[in-house]
Structures are given as structure tokens and as C-alpha cells.
Image (cartoon, rainbow, N blue to C red):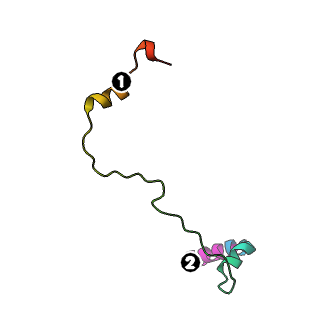
């Protein structure tokens, strides 16, 4: 009995379904011609993180340290 009730509910819900938009139907049609998909570079915008020699820590420290009051813009 439960099987019939579940089957009846499925049929009622299937009757309410709408047809897909024509754009979706045309996309699935293999006989239609279309443009090739555009594939972008997967590595675009990446940075290179190769090992480098260590820099002078004092120079780096001066670049990130707060500026004295007289030098601030």
C-alpha cells in the first residue's frame, strides 16, 4: 500500500514538471554546431616561489619599521 501511495505521489509531482527552456535543449543537441569552449590558463596570476638567497636582515628591517615622526608624509 505504501508503495502505491509513494508511486502516486511521484506521478502527481511528475505531472507538475515543466519542459526545460529551449536553450538547454539546443545545448544537448549533438547535431547543432557551436563555438569551441574557451579555456583559460590554469596558472594565470600565480607567483614564483623558488628559493632565493637570504637578504640582509637590517635592510629588510628598515623597510618595514615605522618611520620617524619627521619623515612621515
Q: Element type at marker 1?
A: loop
Q: What residue is shown with label 1? A: 65
Q: Residue at x 27, y 47 (%)?
A: 52
- Position of residue 30 relative to residue 10, above or below, is below
Q: Which residue is mark 2?
A: 3
Q: Which residues are magenta?
A: 2-12
Q: Nearer the viewer, mark 1 or mark 2?
A: 1
Q: Is residue 41 left or right of residue 63?
A: right
Rounded to the nearest angstrom, the CA distance separating label 1 from label 2 is 74 Å
Q: Residue at x 65, y 76 (%)?
A: 35
Say if 63 sits above or below 16 in the image.
above
Q: Position of residue 28 (x, y in %)?
A: 65, 79
Q: Is-magenta flag for residue 4?
A: yes
Q: Main secondary structure of the magenta part?
A: helix
* Residue toward you, 30 or 13: 30
Q: Secondary structure at mark 2?
A: helix
State yes or no: residue 17 in magenta.
Answer: no
> Local crowd at mark 1 within 10 Å, few (<14), some, or many (≥20)?
few
Q: Residue at x 51, y 19 (%)?
A: 73
Amino acid at each position: 500500500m505504501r508503495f502505491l501511495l509513494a508511486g502516486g505521489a511521484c506521478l502527481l509531482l511528475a505531472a507538475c514538471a515543466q519542459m526545460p527552456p529551449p536553450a538547454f535543449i539546443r545545448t544537448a543537441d549533438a547535431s547543432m554546431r557551436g563555438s569551441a569552449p574557451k579555456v583559460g590558463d590554469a596558472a594565470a596570476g600565480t607567483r614564483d616561489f623558488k628559493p632565493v638567497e637570504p637578504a640582509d636582515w637590517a635592510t629588510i628591517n628598515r623597510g618595514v619599521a615605522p618611520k620617524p615622526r619627521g619623515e612621515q608624509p
